[in-house]
Image: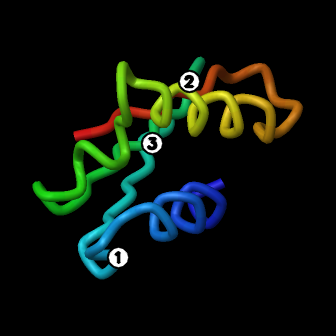
Amino acid sequence: MKALIETIVTSLVDHPEDVVIKETEEETKIVYHLSVHPEDVGKVIGKNGRIAKAIRTVVYAAKSNSNKRVYLDIM
């Protein structure tokens, strides 16, 4: 899943070397913390959050068949 998020985000930003994804797994959820260069935050979030919503939709659809919820936190 981290590779999928990284592939999507690095194609959107001007500073792909600054893309950092950390995974936190708990009993009922998996949280992916996405950090990008400050200049690229707007590109990842998009107008009215449309890009962020699209990325989250793809991540939610691609999650494994586990019972854990998947969250994407953009910092």
Crowd around label 3: few <14 · some 14–19 · many ≥20 (10 Å): many
Secondary structure under tag 1 reads helix
Secondary structure under tag 3 reads strand
Q: Image point 81% across, 29% down: which residue?
A: 66
Circle 1 residue: 16
Q: Position of residue 36 (x, y in %)?
A: 25, 58
Q: Is residue 37 left or right of residue 9?
A: left
The residues bearing labels 3 and 1 have C-alpha atoms spaced at a distance of 17 Å
Q: Image point 65% across, 59% down: which residue?
A: 4
Crowd around label 2: few <14 · some 14–19 · many ≥20 (10 Å): some
Q: Quadrant of the C terminus?
A: top left
* Vertical arrangement, residue 22 with respect to residue 67, above or below: below
Q: Position of residue 60 (x, y in %)?
A: 70, 29
* Vertical arrangement, residue 40 with respect to residue 24, above or below: below
Which residue is the extreme one toward the right?
A: 65
Crowd around label 1: few <14 · some 14–19 · many ≥20 (10 Å): some
Q: Earlier in the sequence, mark 3 or mark 1?
A: 1
Secondary structure under tag 2 reads strand
Circle 2 residue: 29
The residues bearing labels 1 and 2 have C-alpha atoms spaced at a distance of 27 Å
Circle 3 residue: 32
Judged by depth in the image, the label closer to the viewer, 3 or 1, is 1
Q: Image point 56% across, 55% down: which residue?
A: 5
The residues bearing labels 2 and 3 have C-alpha atoms spaced at a distance of 10 Å
Q: Amino acid at mark 2?
A: Lys
Judged by depth in the image, the label closer to the viewer, 2 or 3, is 3
